[in-house]
Amino acid sequence: MGLWLEPNSNGRTYCSSLSCNFRNLPQVQLRSRIVDTPISNRRTEMTMERQQREEEKKPQTSENDKDEKVVQFLDSLNDYLTLMDSLSSALRQGWLELASARHSMGSWRINSAILDHKFHSASTTLQLSSPDDSNYNMKQPHFTLRKWESCDDEDFQSKEVKLDEDEVQKNSDDVQVQKERSKTLLVFGALVSPKLRDAQLSFETALETLVDIANRRSVMLSAYDHVREEILGTKQ
Amino acid sequence: MYGFEAMTFNVHSGYLEAIVRGYRSGLLTAADYNNLCQCETLDDIKMHLTATEYGPYLQNEPSPLHTTTIVEKCTLKLVDEYKHMLCQATEPLSTFLEYITYGHMIDNVVLIVTGTLHERDVQELLEKCHPLGMFDSIATLAVAQNMRELYRLVLVDTPLAPYFSECITSEDLDDMNIEIMRNTLYKAYLEDFYRFCRKLGGATAEIMSDLLSFEADRRAVNITINSIGTELTREDRKKLYSSFGLLYPYGHEELAACEDIDQVRAVMEKYPPYQSIFSKLSYGESQLLDKAFYEEEVKRLCLSFEQQFHFGVFFAYMRLKEQEIRNLMWISECVAQNQKSRVHDSVVFIF
Protein backbone atom coordinates (compact mmCIF):
# COMPACT_ATOMS: atom_id res chain seq x y z
CA MET A 1 0.00 0.00 0.00
CA GLY A 2 1.39 3.39 -0.89
CA LEU A 3 0.29 6.92 -0.35
CA TRP A 4 1.79 9.89 -2.14
CA LEU A 5 1.02 13.52 -2.58
CA GLU A 6 1.44 15.44 -5.81
CA PRO A 7 0.96 19.14 -5.95
CA ASN A 8 -0.55 20.62 -9.09
CA SER A 9 -0.27 24.08 -10.58
CA ASN A 10 -3.19 25.44 -8.59
CA GLY A 11 -1.43 24.70 -5.33
CA ARG A 12 -3.82 21.97 -4.46
CA THR A 13 -2.57 18.55 -3.62
CA TYR A 14 -3.65 15.25 -4.94
CA CYS A 15 -3.68 12.43 -2.67
CA SER A 16 -3.57 9.09 -4.24
CA SER A 17 -4.02 6.03 -2.22
CA LEU A 18 -3.70 2.48 -3.24
CA SER A 19 -5.96 -0.09 -1.79
CA CYS A 20 -5.49 -3.73 -2.05
CA ASN A 21 -7.67 -6.61 -1.13
CA PHE A 22 -5.88 -8.76 1.29
CA ARG A 23 -7.83 -11.51 3.13
CA ASN A 24 -7.36 -10.40 6.54
CA LEU A 25 -7.12 -6.64 6.01
CA PRO A 26 -10.01 -4.29 5.73
CA GLN A 27 -10.78 -3.17 2.17
CA VAL A 28 -9.22 0.06 1.00
CA GLN A 29 -10.44 1.40 -2.29
CA LEU A 30 -8.02 2.82 -4.86
CA ARG A 31 -9.04 6.27 -5.41
CA SER A 32 -7.65 9.50 -6.36
CA ARG A 33 -9.11 12.65 -5.02
CA ILE A 34 -8.20 16.21 -4.35
CA VAL A 35 -7.29 16.63 -0.79
CA ASP A 36 -6.58 20.01 0.84
CA THR A 37 -4.25 20.03 3.71
CA PRO A 38 -6.36 20.63 6.72
CA ILE A 39 -4.43 23.58 8.40
CA SER A 40 -4.01 26.21 5.54
CA ASN A 41 -7.18 25.44 3.67
CA ARG A 42 -8.85 28.77 4.21
CA ARG A 43 -5.72 30.90 3.79
CA THR A 44 -4.74 29.30 0.57
CA GLU A 45 -8.26 29.71 -0.74
CA MET A 46 -8.15 33.40 0.07
CA THR A 47 -4.73 33.80 -1.51
CA MET A 48 -5.89 32.04 -4.60
CA GLU A 49 -9.00 34.18 -4.80
CA ARG A 50 -6.94 37.33 -4.36
CA GLN A 51 -4.54 36.27 -7.05
CA GLN A 52 -7.44 35.52 -9.34
CA ARG A 53 -8.88 39.00 -8.74
CA GLU A 54 -5.52 40.64 -9.36
CA GLU A 55 -5.07 38.76 -12.55
CA GLU A 56 -8.49 39.91 -13.71
CA LYS A 57 -7.63 43.53 -12.78
CA LYS A 58 -4.16 43.41 -14.38
CA PRO A 59 -5.29 43.69 -18.02
CA GLN A 60 -7.54 46.70 -17.13
CA THR A 61 -4.77 48.60 -15.29
CA SER A 62 -2.20 48.07 -18.02
CA GLU A 63 -4.77 49.18 -20.62
CA ASN A 64 -5.30 52.45 -18.72
CA ASP A 65 -1.55 53.01 -18.50
CA LYS A 66 -1.15 52.42 -22.19
CA ASP A 67 -3.95 54.84 -23.02
CA GLU A 68 -2.43 57.44 -20.76
CA LYS A 69 0.93 57.14 -22.42
CA VAL A 70 -0.54 57.32 -25.89
CA VAL A 71 -2.53 60.42 -24.90
CA GLN A 72 0.63 61.93 -23.46
CA PHE A 73 2.47 61.29 -26.70
CA LEU A 74 -0.31 62.77 -28.80
CA ASP A 75 -0.51 65.85 -26.54
CA SER A 76 3.21 66.46 -26.86
CA LEU A 77 2.97 65.97 -30.64
CA ASN A 78 0.13 68.50 -30.81
CA ASP A 79 2.15 71.02 -28.79
CA TYR A 80 5.16 70.42 -31.05
CA LEU A 81 3.15 71.09 -34.21
CA THR A 82 1.57 74.21 -32.69
CA LEU A 83 5.02 75.55 -31.79
CA MET A 84 6.31 74.82 -35.30
CA ASP A 85 3.43 76.84 -36.69
CA SER A 86 4.12 79.80 -34.41
CA LEU A 87 7.84 79.61 -35.29
CA SER A 88 6.97 79.80 -38.96
CA SER A 89 4.78 82.89 -38.35
CA ALA A 90 7.43 84.61 -36.23
CA LEU A 91 10.13 84.04 -38.85
CA ARG A 92 7.91 85.20 -41.71
CA GLN A 93 7.06 88.33 -39.75
CA GLY A 94 10.72 88.93 -38.90
CA TRP A 95 11.96 88.59 -42.47
CA LEU A 96 9.26 90.89 -43.79
CA GLU A 97 10.04 93.51 -41.14
CA LEU A 98 13.73 93.26 -42.02
CA ALA A 99 12.89 93.84 -45.68
CA SER A 100 10.72 96.76 -44.62
CA ALA A 101 13.61 98.23 -42.61
CA ARG A 102 15.93 97.89 -45.63
CA HIS A 103 13.28 99.61 -47.75
CA SER A 104 13.07 102.45 -45.23
CA MET A 105 16.74 102.92 -44.31
CA GLY A 106 18.36 101.78 -47.54
CA SER A 107 20.14 98.56 -48.43
CA TRP A 108 23.58 100.14 -47.89
CA ARG A 109 22.75 100.61 -44.21
CA ILE A 110 21.34 97.15 -43.61
CA ASN A 111 23.44 94.48 -45.20
CA SER A 112 25.69 91.64 -44.18
CA ALA A 113 28.87 93.56 -45.08
CA ILE A 114 28.69 95.74 -41.95
CA LEU A 115 28.09 93.01 -39.40
CA ASP A 116 30.68 93.10 -36.63
CA HIS A 117 33.50 90.59 -37.00
CA LYS A 118 35.32 91.75 -33.87
CA PHE A 119 35.37 89.33 -31.00
CA HIS A 120 32.60 89.96 -28.49
CA SER A 121 30.80 87.80 -25.96
CA ALA A 122 27.45 86.32 -26.86
CA SER A 123 24.44 88.23 -25.64
CA THR A 124 22.33 85.07 -25.56
CA THR A 125 23.38 81.53 -24.66
CA LEU A 126 21.75 78.12 -24.53
CA GLN A 127 22.17 75.85 -21.52
CA LEU A 128 21.61 72.11 -21.90
CA SER A 129 20.73 69.98 -18.89
CA SER A 130 21.14 66.31 -19.72
CA PRO A 131 20.17 63.24 -17.63
CA ASP A 132 23.90 62.54 -17.16
CA ASP A 133 24.27 65.68 -15.04
CA SER A 134 24.33 65.01 -11.33
CA ASN A 135 22.18 68.04 -10.55
CA TYR A 136 19.48 67.17 -13.04
CA ASN A 137 16.78 64.66 -12.12
CA MET A 138 14.64 64.48 -15.27
CA LYS A 139 14.86 61.65 -17.77
CA GLN A 140 14.99 63.78 -20.91
CA PRO A 141 17.37 66.65 -21.82
CA HIS A 142 16.15 70.20 -21.26
CA PHE A 143 17.23 73.42 -23.01
CA THR A 144 17.22 76.81 -21.27
CA LEU A 145 17.69 80.09 -23.10
CA ARG A 146 19.62 82.76 -21.22
CA LYS A 147 18.99 86.06 -22.97
CA TRP A 148 20.99 89.26 -22.78
CA GLU A 149 23.71 87.79 -20.59
CA SER A 150 26.12 90.65 -21.22
CA CYS A 151 24.13 92.74 -18.77
CA ASP A 152 24.43 92.25 -14.98
CA ASP A 153 23.70 88.54 -14.51
CA GLU A 154 22.54 88.50 -10.93
CA ASP A 155 20.06 91.29 -11.31
CA PHE A 156 18.69 90.08 -14.60
CA GLN A 157 18.38 86.34 -14.20
CA SER A 158 16.78 86.38 -10.81
CA LYS A 159 13.08 85.83 -11.25
CA GLU A 160 12.20 85.11 -7.66
CA VAL A 161 11.93 88.50 -6.07
CA LYS A 162 10.22 89.68 -2.98
CA LEU A 163 6.74 91.01 -3.44
CA ASP A 164 7.80 94.49 -2.30
CA GLU A 165 10.53 94.79 -4.93
CA ASP A 166 8.54 93.28 -7.80
CA GLU A 167 7.78 96.46 -9.73
CA VAL A 168 11.17 98.07 -9.21
CA GLN A 169 13.01 94.93 -10.26
CA LYS A 170 10.79 94.45 -13.30
CA ASN A 171 11.31 98.06 -14.44
CA SER A 172 15.07 97.90 -14.08
CA ASP A 173 15.11 94.57 -15.94
CA ASP A 174 13.05 96.05 -18.76
CA VAL A 175 15.33 99.07 -19.04
CA GLN A 176 18.39 96.84 -19.02
CA VAL A 177 16.95 94.60 -21.72
CA GLN A 178 16.03 97.62 -23.85
CA LYS A 179 19.59 98.92 -23.55
CA GLU A 180 21.01 95.56 -24.57
CA ARG A 181 18.66 95.41 -27.54
CA SER A 182 19.68 98.90 -28.67
CA LYS A 183 23.34 98.01 -28.19
CA THR A 184 22.95 95.02 -30.50
CA LEU A 185 21.42 97.20 -33.19
CA LEU A 186 24.32 99.68 -33.07
CA VAL A 187 25.89 97.57 -35.81
CA PHE A 188 23.46 99.21 -38.23
CA GLY A 189 23.83 102.70 -36.76
CA ALA A 190 22.70 104.53 -33.67
CA LEU A 191 19.49 105.86 -35.20
CA VAL A 192 17.64 102.93 -36.72
CA SER A 193 14.10 102.68 -37.95
CA PRO A 194 11.39 101.26 -35.61
CA LYS A 195 10.88 98.57 -38.25
CA LEU A 196 14.34 97.20 -37.54
CA ARG A 197 13.53 97.08 -33.82
CA ASP A 198 10.32 95.21 -34.63
CA ALA A 199 12.30 92.73 -36.73
CA GLN A 200 14.65 92.21 -33.78
CA LEU A 201 11.71 91.41 -31.49
CA SER A 202 10.25 88.97 -34.01
CA PHE A 203 13.52 87.08 -34.33
CA GLU A 204 13.87 87.06 -30.55
CA THR A 205 10.42 85.47 -30.29
CA ALA A 206 11.43 82.94 -32.94
CA LEU A 207 14.54 82.04 -30.92
CA GLU A 208 12.46 81.46 -27.78
CA THR A 209 10.05 79.33 -29.79
CA LEU A 210 12.95 77.27 -31.16
CA VAL A 211 14.08 76.43 -27.64
CA ASP A 212 10.51 75.51 -26.66
CA ILE A 213 10.36 73.26 -29.73
CA ALA A 214 13.57 71.52 -28.70
CA ASN A 215 12.19 70.87 -25.20
CA ARG A 216 8.85 69.73 -26.53
CA ARG A 217 10.56 67.41 -28.99
CA SER A 218 12.57 65.91 -26.17
CA VAL A 219 9.36 65.22 -24.20
CA MET A 220 7.66 63.88 -27.32
CA LEU A 221 10.48 61.44 -28.06
CA SER A 222 10.45 60.25 -24.46
CA ALA A 223 6.67 59.69 -24.62
CA TYR A 224 7.12 57.84 -27.90
CA ASP A 225 9.70 55.54 -26.30
CA HIS A 226 7.27 54.73 -23.49
CA VAL A 227 4.50 53.92 -25.96
CA ARG A 228 6.82 51.71 -27.96
CA GLU A 229 7.90 49.85 -24.84
CA GLU A 230 4.28 49.22 -23.95
CA ILE A 231 3.51 47.89 -27.41
CA LEU A 232 6.53 45.62 -27.43
CA GLY A 233 5.72 44.41 -23.92
CA THR A 234 2.17 43.52 -24.95
CA LYS A 235 3.36 41.55 -27.99
CA GLN A 236 5.64 39.47 -25.83
CA MET B 1 15.61 136.64 -64.16
CA TYR B 2 12.51 134.75 -63.13
CA GLY B 3 10.02 134.34 -65.94
CA PHE B 4 12.58 134.85 -68.70
CA GLU B 5 14.27 131.45 -68.52
CA ALA B 6 12.68 130.54 -71.87
CA MET B 7 15.03 132.96 -73.57
CA THR B 8 18.28 131.42 -72.45
CA PHE B 9 17.71 128.05 -70.83
CA ASN B 10 17.63 125.97 -74.01
CA VAL B 11 20.98 127.32 -75.18
CA HIS B 12 22.91 125.13 -72.77
CA SER B 13 20.39 122.85 -71.11
CA GLY B 14 17.55 122.39 -73.57
CA TYR B 15 18.89 119.16 -74.99
CA LEU B 16 19.37 117.63 -71.56
CA GLU B 17 15.93 118.74 -70.40
CA ALA B 18 14.48 116.93 -73.41
CA ILE B 19 16.57 113.87 -72.55
CA VAL B 20 15.38 113.82 -68.94
CA ARG B 21 11.76 114.22 -70.00
CA GLY B 22 12.27 111.27 -72.30
CA TYR B 23 13.69 109.28 -69.41
CA ARG B 24 10.65 110.25 -67.35
CA SER B 25 8.30 108.70 -69.89
CA GLY B 26 10.13 105.41 -69.39
CA LEU B 27 9.19 105.18 -65.71
CA LEU B 28 6.94 102.24 -64.80
CA THR B 29 3.19 102.88 -64.77
CA ALA B 30 0.44 101.56 -62.52
CA ALA B 31 -0.30 98.83 -65.09
CA ASP B 32 3.33 97.68 -64.93
CA TYR B 33 3.20 97.56 -61.14
CA ASN B 34 -0.05 95.60 -61.21
CA ASN B 35 1.56 93.00 -63.46
CA LEU B 36 4.63 92.84 -61.26
CA CYS B 37 2.54 92.46 -58.09
CA GLN B 38 0.92 89.36 -59.57
CA CYS B 39 4.20 87.57 -60.25
CA GLU B 40 4.76 84.29 -58.48
CA THR B 41 8.56 84.11 -58.69
CA LEU B 42 11.53 86.40 -59.25
CA ASP B 43 11.92 84.92 -62.70
CA ASP B 44 8.42 86.17 -63.54
CA ILE B 45 9.47 89.63 -62.37
CA LYS B 46 12.55 89.42 -64.57
CA MET B 47 10.39 88.41 -67.51
CA HIS B 48 8.09 91.40 -67.01
CA LEU B 49 10.97 93.82 -66.56
CA THR B 50 12.63 92.52 -69.71
CA ALA B 51 9.73 94.06 -71.62
CA THR B 52 10.44 97.49 -70.05
CA GLU B 53 13.48 99.76 -70.29
CA TYR B 54 15.26 97.54 -67.76
CA GLY B 55 15.35 94.76 -70.38
CA PRO B 56 18.99 95.11 -71.50
CA TYR B 57 20.18 95.10 -67.89
CA LEU B 58 18.29 92.02 -66.70
CA GLN B 59 17.88 89.73 -69.68
CA ASN B 60 21.28 88.07 -69.30
CA GLU B 61 21.04 87.45 -65.59
CA PRO B 62 21.04 83.72 -64.83
CA SER B 63 18.47 82.03 -62.61
CA PRO B 64 18.01 81.73 -59.69
CA LEU B 65 17.71 85.46 -59.21
CA HIS B 66 18.12 87.28 -55.95
CA THR B 67 16.37 90.48 -54.95
CA THR B 68 19.71 92.30 -54.56
CA THR B 69 20.59 91.39 -58.15
CA ILE B 70 17.41 93.00 -59.45
CA VAL B 71 18.12 96.16 -57.42
CA GLU B 72 21.76 96.29 -58.58
CA LYS B 73 20.87 96.00 -62.26
CA CYS B 74 18.11 98.58 -62.04
CA THR B 75 20.51 100.93 -60.23
CA LEU B 76 23.03 100.43 -63.05
CA LYS B 77 20.46 101.82 -65.48
CA LEU B 78 20.05 104.91 -63.30
CA VAL B 79 23.82 105.36 -63.12
CA ASP B 80 24.19 105.08 -66.91
CA GLU B 81 21.47 107.68 -67.47
CA TYR B 82 23.03 110.00 -64.91
CA LYS B 83 26.49 109.70 -66.43
CA HIS B 84 25.06 110.35 -69.88
CA MET B 85 23.51 113.60 -68.63
CA LEU B 86 26.57 114.63 -66.57
CA CYS B 87 29.06 114.21 -69.38
CA GLN B 88 27.01 116.52 -71.60
CA ALA B 89 26.13 119.11 -68.97
CA THR B 90 27.75 122.52 -68.70
CA GLU B 91 27.91 124.82 -65.72
CA PRO B 92 25.89 125.36 -63.63
CA LEU B 93 23.92 122.22 -64.52
CA SER B 94 27.00 120.00 -64.08
CA THR B 95 27.51 121.26 -60.52
CA PHE B 96 23.80 120.81 -59.88
CA LEU B 97 23.96 117.20 -61.08
CA GLU B 98 27.01 116.56 -58.90
CA TYR B 99 25.18 117.89 -55.87
CA ILE B 100 22.54 115.22 -56.38
CA THR B 101 25.14 112.50 -55.75
CA TYR B 102 26.75 113.93 -52.58
CA GLY B 103 24.13 112.19 -50.42
CA HIS B 104 25.24 108.84 -51.80
CA MET B 105 28.85 109.82 -51.28
CA ILE B 106 28.16 110.42 -47.59
CA ASP B 107 26.43 107.05 -47.33
CA ASN B 108 29.41 105.34 -48.94
CA VAL B 109 31.89 107.06 -46.61
CA VAL B 110 29.87 105.95 -43.59
CA LEU B 111 29.58 102.41 -44.96
CA ILE B 112 33.35 102.09 -45.43
CA VAL B 113 34.16 103.59 -42.04
CA THR B 114 31.57 101.44 -40.24
CA GLY B 115 32.69 98.30 -42.01
CA THR B 116 36.33 99.02 -41.19
CA LEU B 117 35.41 99.58 -37.55
CA HIS B 118 33.81 96.13 -37.61
CA GLU B 119 36.95 94.60 -39.15
CA ARG B 120 35.41 93.84 -42.51
CA ASP B 121 37.30 93.47 -45.79
CA VAL B 122 37.48 96.71 -47.78
CA GLN B 123 36.79 95.01 -51.12
CA GLU B 124 33.60 93.50 -49.74
CA LEU B 125 32.53 96.95 -48.56
CA LEU B 126 33.35 98.59 -51.87
CA GLU B 127 31.04 96.14 -53.64
CA LYS B 128 28.17 97.31 -51.43
CA CYS B 129 28.73 101.01 -52.09
CA HIS B 130 26.24 102.97 -54.16
CA PRO B 131 27.77 103.53 -57.62
CA LEU B 132 26.61 107.16 -57.74
CA GLY B 133 28.61 107.97 -54.63
CA MET B 134 32.00 106.55 -55.67
CA PHE B 135 35.14 108.67 -55.78
CA ASP B 136 38.78 107.86 -56.45
CA SER B 137 40.26 107.66 -52.98
CA ILE B 138 37.33 105.94 -51.31
CA ALA B 139 39.28 102.77 -50.53
CA THR B 140 41.81 104.70 -48.41
CA LEU B 141 39.06 105.54 -45.92
CA ALA B 142 39.85 102.22 -44.25
CA VAL B 143 43.11 103.56 -42.74
CA ALA B 144 41.53 106.40 -40.73
CA GLN B 145 41.13 105.96 -36.96
CA ASN B 146 39.30 109.19 -36.15
CA MET B 147 37.51 111.99 -37.98
CA ARG B 148 40.55 114.23 -38.12
CA GLU B 149 42.51 111.54 -39.97
CA LEU B 150 39.47 110.81 -42.13
CA TYR B 151 39.43 114.41 -43.22
CA ARG B 152 43.17 114.93 -43.55
CA LEU B 153 44.01 111.72 -45.41
CA VAL B 154 41.04 111.29 -47.69
CA LEU B 155 38.16 113.69 -47.65
CA VAL B 156 40.04 116.95 -47.93
CA ASP B 157 40.22 116.45 -51.72
CA THR B 158 36.60 115.44 -52.14
CA PRO B 159 33.47 117.56 -52.48
CA LEU B 160 32.56 116.58 -48.91
CA ALA B 161 35.49 118.51 -47.41
CA PRO B 162 33.52 121.70 -46.68
CA TYR B 163 30.95 119.68 -44.73
CA PHE B 164 33.48 118.35 -42.24
CA SER B 165 34.14 121.57 -40.41
CA GLU B 166 31.32 120.94 -37.93
CA CYS B 167 32.23 117.40 -37.01
CA ILE B 168 36.00 117.19 -36.90
CA THR B 169 37.14 115.71 -33.62
CA SER B 170 40.05 113.58 -32.55
CA GLU B 171 37.81 111.07 -30.82
CA ASP B 172 38.13 107.56 -32.06
CA LEU B 173 35.36 106.49 -34.35
CA ASP B 174 32.62 104.38 -32.77
CA ASP B 175 29.05 103.58 -33.76
CA MET B 176 27.52 106.64 -32.10
CA ASN B 177 30.16 109.05 -33.44
CA ILE B 178 29.71 107.66 -36.92
CA GLU B 179 25.95 108.17 -36.73
CA ILE B 180 26.43 111.76 -35.55
CA MET B 181 28.96 112.26 -38.35
CA ARG B 182 26.53 110.89 -40.94
CA ASN B 183 23.72 113.17 -39.90
CA THR B 184 25.93 116.23 -39.46
CA LEU B 185 27.41 115.74 -42.92
CA TYR B 186 24.01 115.28 -44.47
CA LYS B 187 22.70 118.39 -42.74
CA ALA B 188 25.64 120.43 -44.04
CA TYR B 189 25.17 118.99 -47.54
CA LEU B 190 21.46 119.81 -47.65
CA GLU B 191 22.05 123.36 -46.46
CA ASP B 192 24.80 123.85 -49.04
CA PHE B 193 22.62 122.45 -51.82
CA TYR B 194 19.79 124.74 -50.70
CA ARG B 195 22.06 127.80 -50.81
CA PHE B 196 23.34 126.82 -54.26
CA CYS B 197 19.80 126.49 -55.63
CA ARG B 198 18.77 129.83 -54.10
CA LYS B 199 21.76 131.40 -55.79
CA LEU B 200 20.70 130.00 -59.16
CA GLY B 201 17.42 131.85 -58.75
CA GLY B 202 14.37 131.70 -61.01
CA ALA B 203 12.20 128.62 -61.33
CA THR B 204 15.05 126.39 -60.17
CA ALA B 205 15.28 128.24 -56.85
CA GLU B 206 11.53 128.15 -56.31
CA ILE B 207 11.00 124.50 -57.14
CA MET B 208 14.16 123.18 -55.53
CA SER B 209 13.53 125.19 -52.35
CA ASP B 210 10.20 123.43 -51.97
CA LEU B 211 11.66 119.99 -52.65
CA LEU B 212 14.69 120.45 -50.40
CA SER B 213 12.57 121.93 -47.59
CA PHE B 214 10.37 118.85 -47.70
CA GLU B 215 13.50 116.68 -47.59
CA ALA B 216 14.82 118.59 -44.56
CA ASP B 217 11.48 118.32 -42.74
CA ARG B 218 11.22 114.60 -43.45
CA ARG B 219 14.74 114.10 -42.16
CA ALA B 220 13.85 115.94 -38.98
CA VAL B 221 10.85 113.68 -38.38
CA ASN B 222 12.83 110.52 -39.10
CA ILE B 223 15.68 111.57 -36.80
CA THR B 224 13.15 112.28 -34.06
CA ILE B 225 11.35 108.97 -34.41
CA ASN B 226 14.53 106.92 -34.75
CA SER B 227 16.10 108.56 -31.70
CA ILE B 228 13.16 107.88 -29.38
CA GLY B 229 14.37 105.55 -26.65
CA THR B 230 18.07 106.01 -27.50
CA GLU B 231 20.82 107.83 -25.66
CA LEU B 232 20.72 110.85 -27.99
CA THR B 233 19.98 113.92 -25.89
CA ARG B 234 17.56 116.66 -26.89
CA GLU B 235 20.37 119.09 -27.61
CA ASP B 236 22.24 116.60 -29.78
CA ARG B 237 19.02 115.77 -31.60
CA LYS B 238 18.35 119.45 -32.31
CA LYS B 239 21.86 119.90 -33.70
CA LEU B 240 21.10 117.31 -36.39
CA TYR B 241 18.08 119.21 -37.78
CA SER B 242 18.70 121.39 -40.87
CA SER B 243 18.51 125.17 -40.63
CA PHE B 244 15.79 125.57 -43.19
CA GLY B 245 12.41 124.08 -44.02
CA LEU B 246 8.84 124.60 -42.93
CA LEU B 247 9.57 123.22 -39.46
CA TYR B 248 12.53 125.54 -38.85
CA PRO B 249 12.85 126.86 -36.14
CA TYR B 250 9.75 126.38 -33.98
CA GLY B 251 8.83 122.93 -35.21
CA HIS B 252 12.38 121.77 -34.49
CA GLU B 253 12.13 123.07 -30.92
CA GLU B 254 9.01 121.00 -30.35
CA LEU B 255 10.31 117.92 -32.18
CA ALA B 256 13.47 117.92 -30.08
CA ALA B 257 11.31 117.46 -26.96
CA CYS B 258 9.18 114.60 -28.33
CA GLU B 259 9.38 111.27 -26.50
CA ASP B 260 6.93 109.20 -28.54
CA ILE B 261 5.23 109.02 -31.92
CA ASP B 262 2.01 110.64 -30.69
CA GLN B 263 3.89 113.76 -29.58
CA VAL B 264 5.52 113.90 -33.02
CA ARG B 265 2.08 113.67 -34.59
CA ALA B 266 0.82 116.50 -32.38
CA VAL B 267 3.69 118.73 -33.53
CA MET B 268 3.34 117.90 -37.23
CA GLU B 269 -0.41 118.35 -37.35
CA LYS B 270 0.07 122.05 -36.70
CA TYR B 271 1.54 122.37 -40.20
CA PRO B 272 -1.14 122.00 -42.93
CA PRO B 273 1.04 120.28 -45.56
CA TYR B 274 1.89 117.54 -43.05
CA GLN B 275 -1.55 117.26 -41.51
CA SER B 276 -2.74 115.22 -44.48
CA ILE B 277 0.22 112.85 -44.06
CA PHE B 278 -0.39 112.16 -40.39
CA SER B 279 -4.14 111.93 -40.82
CA LYS B 280 -3.58 108.68 -42.76
CA LEU B 281 -1.99 107.07 -39.69
CA SER B 282 -3.74 105.73 -36.64
CA TYR B 283 -2.52 106.73 -33.18
CA GLY B 284 0.68 105.12 -32.04
CA GLU B 285 1.44 103.77 -35.51
CA SER B 286 4.55 104.62 -37.49
CA GLN B 287 4.70 101.73 -39.94
CA LEU B 288 2.94 103.56 -42.78
CA LEU B 289 4.65 106.90 -42.14
CA ASP B 290 7.41 106.16 -44.63
CA LYS B 291 4.91 105.36 -47.35
CA ALA B 292 2.91 108.51 -46.57
CA PHE B 293 6.05 110.66 -46.87
CA TYR B 294 7.10 108.92 -50.08
CA GLU B 295 3.66 109.52 -51.59
CA GLU B 296 3.85 113.21 -50.76
CA GLU B 297 7.36 113.43 -52.16
CA VAL B 298 6.34 111.71 -55.41
CA LYS B 299 3.42 114.13 -55.78
CA ARG B 300 5.76 117.13 -55.46
CA LEU B 301 8.36 115.60 -57.78
CA CYS B 302 5.76 114.91 -60.48
CA LEU B 303 4.48 118.50 -60.19
CA SER B 304 7.95 119.83 -60.95
CA PHE B 305 7.65 118.41 -64.48
CA GLU B 306 4.69 120.70 -65.08
CA GLN B 307 7.04 123.65 -65.44
CA GLN B 308 9.81 124.07 -67.99
CA PHE B 309 13.28 125.63 -68.09
CA HIS B 310 14.55 124.73 -64.66
CA PHE B 311 16.97 122.20 -63.17
CA GLY B 312 14.41 120.77 -60.79
CA VAL B 313 13.38 118.19 -63.41
CA PHE B 314 16.80 116.54 -63.15
CA PHE B 315 16.58 116.25 -59.38
CA ALA B 316 12.97 115.07 -59.67
CA TYR B 317 13.83 112.40 -62.21
CA MET B 318 16.68 111.03 -60.11
CA ARG B 319 14.44 110.86 -57.05
CA LEU B 320 11.56 109.28 -58.96
CA LYS B 321 13.91 106.66 -60.37
CA GLU B 322 15.18 105.87 -56.89
CA GLN B 323 11.59 105.50 -55.74
CA GLU B 324 10.93 103.13 -58.64
CA ILE B 325 13.93 101.03 -57.63
CA ARG B 326 12.62 100.96 -54.05
CA ASN B 327 9.27 99.78 -55.36
CA LEU B 328 10.92 97.00 -57.36
CA MET B 329 12.97 96.00 -54.32
CA TRP B 330 9.84 95.76 -52.17
CA ILE B 331 7.85 93.81 -54.77
CA SER B 332 10.77 91.40 -55.22
CA GLU B 333 11.06 90.85 -51.47
CA CYS B 334 7.33 90.18 -51.11
CA VAL B 335 7.37 87.72 -54.01
CA ALA B 336 10.53 85.99 -52.75
CA GLN B 337 9.09 85.66 -49.23
CA ASN B 338 5.66 84.59 -50.51
CA GLN B 339 4.01 87.59 -48.84
CA LYS B 340 2.19 89.07 -51.81
CA SER B 341 -0.65 90.28 -49.61
CA ARG B 342 1.76 92.85 -48.13
CA VAL B 343 3.04 94.15 -51.43
CA HIS B 344 0.87 97.28 -51.36
CA ASP B 345 2.18 98.28 -47.91
CA SER B 346 5.13 100.11 -49.43
CA VAL B 347 4.66 100.43 -53.19
CA VAL B 348 4.15 104.06 -54.26
CA PHE B 349 2.71 104.50 -57.71
CA ILE B 350 4.37 107.27 -59.67
CA PHE B 351 1.84 107.66 -62.46
Image (tube, coloured by chain):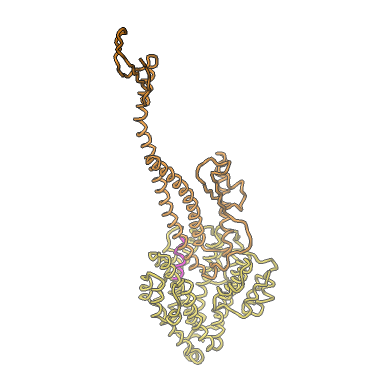
State the yellow chain: B
- In-front residue for pair A231/A83: A231
Q: In this view, does A33 lie above or below B17?
A: above
Instruction: Report whether residue B4 is seen.
Output: no
Residue B281 image position (x, y, % from top left): 43, 62
Image quarter of residue A15: top left
Q: Residue at x 42, y 79 (%)?
A: B27
Quadrant where the N terminus of chain A sits is top left
Image quarter of residue B164: bottom right
Residue A31 image position (x, y, % from top left): 30, 17
Q: What stretch is highlighted in magenta?
A: B285-294
Q: Is residue B197 left or right of residue B116?
A: left
- In-front residue for pair B8/A143: A143
Instruction: Report whether residue B132 is seen.
Output: yes
Label tally: 0
Q: Residue at x 54, y 75 (%)?
A: B130
Main secondary structure along the magenta-highlighted residues: helix
Q: In this view, does A44 lie to the left or right of B127?
A: left
Q: In this view, does B78 lie above or below B120?
A: below
Q: Does the magenta stretch include residue B289?
A: yes
Q: Is residue B306 above or below residue B296?
A: below
Q: Residue at x 39, y 40 (%)?
A: A236
Q: Is residue B267 left or right of residue B159?
A: left
Residue A217 image position (x, y, % from top left): 46, 49
- In-front residue for pair B186/B101: B101
Q: Colour of chain A?
A: orange
- In-front residue for pair B102/A27: A27
Q: Is residue A86 magenta?
A: no
Q: Residue at x 49, y 65 (%)?
A: A101
Residue occupying the far front of the picture: A23
